Image (spheres, rainbow, N blue to C red):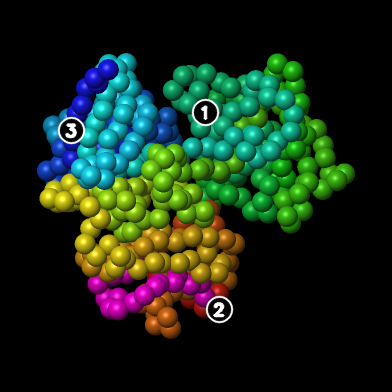
Amino acid sequence: MAIDRIEADVVVLVGGPAGLAAALAAAGAGARTIILEREERLGGILKQCVHDGFGLRRFGEALTGTEYALRFSALIPGSGVETMTGAFVHEVARDEERGIYRLVAISAERGIFAIETASIVVATGCRERSDRQILIHGDRPAGVFTAGLAQRLVNVEGLLPGKKALILGSGDIGLIMARRLLLEGMEIEGVYEVKAEASGLARNIAQCLVDFGIPLHLSTTVTEIHGGRRVESVTIAKVDERGSPISGSERRVACDTLILSVGLIPENEILQSLGLPLDPATRGPRVDQSGWAGLPGLFACGNAVHVNDLVDDVSDSGEIAGAAAARFAREEHHALPAGHDARVPLKAGPGLLYAVPQLIDPRQKGKVDIHFRTNATIREGARVLLKSGDRVVAERRFIALRPPEAESLSFDPTLLGEVQALVLELDRQAGAGGAA
């Protein structure tokens, strides 16, 4: 059966903040650009975020997530970007002989259709971990929600998930929902975190928990869910330094709702279907500063690469990847760029969880921001050094570093000279001294 075939220069997957920025940048560079979005409206997760704090850097004011999404979405009409909403990608394959990608998608409006494109920008964001991924025992009665699902129920559907909630995990969405549910009339039993310190940003701990008197229980987790058709209670227990429940510390807590805020995972099944390995530390692809993800014309950005703290960083990476995808699409031969093997690997040293981008192209002009996280809290201050052998290429001093808060270091790659590899190193002996 013949199916409709559409041609494009750049296809962006999908229409969240990274995808919108990428599509606008690609179209602005003259590329025929299509956004494929599985939902009926653009904006991604921001459509259900009614709290403020978005866009301080990009728009110079504190916007709600919905306002941020609307500002970007309003730029799409007249930009030359074609949007296909309610569309699901079924298959992606690369035709090496023709130097293009072929995507097979389906939507209620178009049925099954194919798009042939020189470049793809993967901006698929991230998803939440479920109760099964953190090995909670017991049945699966009604009343167990991820924080994002609870957020959608309240902010979009106008529904409360229950009457009394216990929140497992102190990620930012969970902290925000603790406050939101309390304001909407639910009783919040408390927030429980398996680690010895909270996982969310300090401002969210202060504004969402401390300001509203919601208790935070550290080094504590849920070990079992109880209930028939609906959650009736959960068993919680203290944990040791390895995160294992301490025998004898268990107690049962009554609640009808369990909200899970236990981490985010980049959504990268499409990249894996193309045979690309993922970085085990970020769960995203290895990219260079343009977002190039290892195959000709394939770029990635936003939370598909690593989970960001700020939506402005997500949008910035989308713009960079979209512009790079458009440049690639304009090339006569859609193959690996000349000198692609000149990219220098960047490794995160001891004490650092990861560093992105993992590859640096010294030929690309413009400042490069290396985003990184530490694997432990450092309160006494430290320096972070970008080194080539014994030579320090760039450095930045920090008063404190926390794993939940991503930091960055900037440098000019054209100043690298002849280097074979780069390492981002943590110097704990630097002392506080002020942040650069």
Does dot 2 land on a helix, a strand or a loop? Answer: helix
Does dot 1 land on a helix, a strand or a loop? Answer: helix
Image location (x, y in percent) of residue 410:
34, 66
Residue 306, compared with residue 372, is above or below; it is: above
Query: What's drawn in magenta, residue-wise?
Result: 410-427
What mark, if any, has residue 84 been given in the picture? none
Q: Distance between the Cα atoms at labels 1 and 3?
A: 36 Å
Q: Distance between the Cα atoms at labels 2 and 3?
A: 56 Å
Residue 375 visible somewhere in the drawing: yes
Label 2 crowding class (10 Å Cα cut-off): few <14, some 14-19, many 20+?
A: few
Image location (x, y in percent) of residue 247:
85, 46
The mark nearer the N terminus, 2 or 3, is 3
The mark nearer the N terminus, 1 or 2, is 1
Q: Distance between the Cα atoms at labels 1 and 2?
A: 43 Å
Q: From the viewer's perspective, tell me whether residue 429 is left or right of residue 335.
A: right
Locate the N terminus by quadrant.
top left
Q: Amino acid at mark 2?
A: Gln
Residue 213 visible somewhere in the drawing: no
Question: What residue sits right under mark 1 in the picture?
Answer: 149
The residue positioned 53% from the left and 37% from the top of the image is 128
Q: Nearer the viewer, residue 41 or 110?
A: 110
Q: Residue lying furthest front in this view?
A: 97
Does dot 3 land on a helix, a strand or a loop? Answer: strand
Q: Amino acid at mark 1?
A: Leu
What mark, if any, has residue 7 been given in the picture? 3
Q: Nearer the viewer, mark 2 or mark 3?
A: 3
Question: What residue sits right under mark 2 in the picture?
Answer: 429
Image location (x, y in percent) of residue 430:
52, 78
Q: Residue lying furthest right in this view?
A: 248
Q: Nearer the viewer, residue 251 or 21?
A: 21
